Amino acid sequence: MAVIGWIGLGNMGGHMSVNLVKAGHDVRGFDLNPAALAAAEAGGVKRAASIAEAVDGADAVFTMLPKGEHARAVYLGEDGVLKHADTRTLLIDSSTIDIASAQELHDAAAAAGFRFVDAPVSGGMSGAEAGTLTFMVGGEDGAVNDASGYIGPMSGNIIPTGGPTTGQAAKICNNLMLFINLASTAEGAVLADRLGLDKQVFWNIASVSSGDSWALRTWYPVPGVVPTAASNNDFAPTFTTELANKDIGLAISAADDTGTPLEIGKHVQQLFQRLIDAGDAGKDCSMIIKLVDGSLQPADGTPSN
């Protein structure tokens, strides 16, 4: 089996790297967070003390990082991937980042003689743990095909999207739609309750009718309806508000660059920002329902209007 370097062992990368171990790969992981390193190590990932150690002799390197600035630092820095990996190593970035950063990574990798793909994912922490993520893979055809072989144990779907940065483009647009769906689901759920509908009855109707969406089926923000939903666990994060705000911000930035109006998307971003301002950046993004039902408690503890 393959030797794989993995950089970024957080909520997503930790589970994903362990699934590669379960598939028989030799995975060497690096993260700045000791707790993340320890959790991955418990799942069979070999602890690396540096990026250089993680990528040494690797057939492929995966990165799963929070933002474009982190991805640029990991790949382009003096102690980064491009300085230490062998050019035969296939580079696969599964972070969700801005288009400009993704293009910079493609260009820098190509100039240094590497093959690189942008391969962001959809499916959240539950999909990362279960190995059912959807990968959207952009880059040169041969590199995309080779990357798919490594991605398999972590995925339910692998979808080539086209040339460089198209994976990121697909992810950004998909998440824009997701968060708009989540906001509309929260509004519909609260209105249904106030009109006297039983919460389970309404969900049963919406989930097989035109109001259906992935957000409704998986992240339903009313407790006691969908077992996987964070609403059943005091909105402990499956996808944090901070990350949701970052992702929808990427869509807004791309829209500004392309002259595309995103009136609904910009409004939803403002709702996430209100949650962050109230001190709930680390809570699940489905907590957006508390802006609809009026139960949000701001950071100073005073009731919201």
Image (cartoon, rainbow, N blue to C red):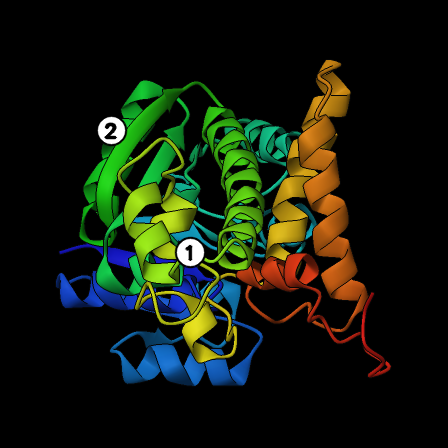
Q: Residues within 10 Å of mark 1 (few under 14, many from 20)?
A: some
The mark closer to the camera, 2 or 1, is 1
**Quarter where residue 160 is shown:** top left
Q: Nearer the viewer, residue 272 or 249?
A: 272
Residue that protrudes farthest toward the front in the picture = 196
- Marks 2/1: CA distance? 49 Å
Image point (37%, 32%), residue name? 137
Q: Quadrant of the C terminus?
A: bottom right
Q: Which mark is residue 197?
A: 1
Name the side, left or right, on which 38 lies relative to 100: left
Q: Nearer the viewer, residue 258 or 279?
A: 279
Q: Which residue is mark 2?
A: 145
| Amino acid type indicated by mark 2 | Asn
**Quarter where residue 248 is shown:** top right
Q: Position of residue 119 (x, y in %)?
A: 41, 38
Name the side, left or right, on which 113 lies relative to 251: left
Q: Position of residue 12 (x, y in %)?
A: 42, 62
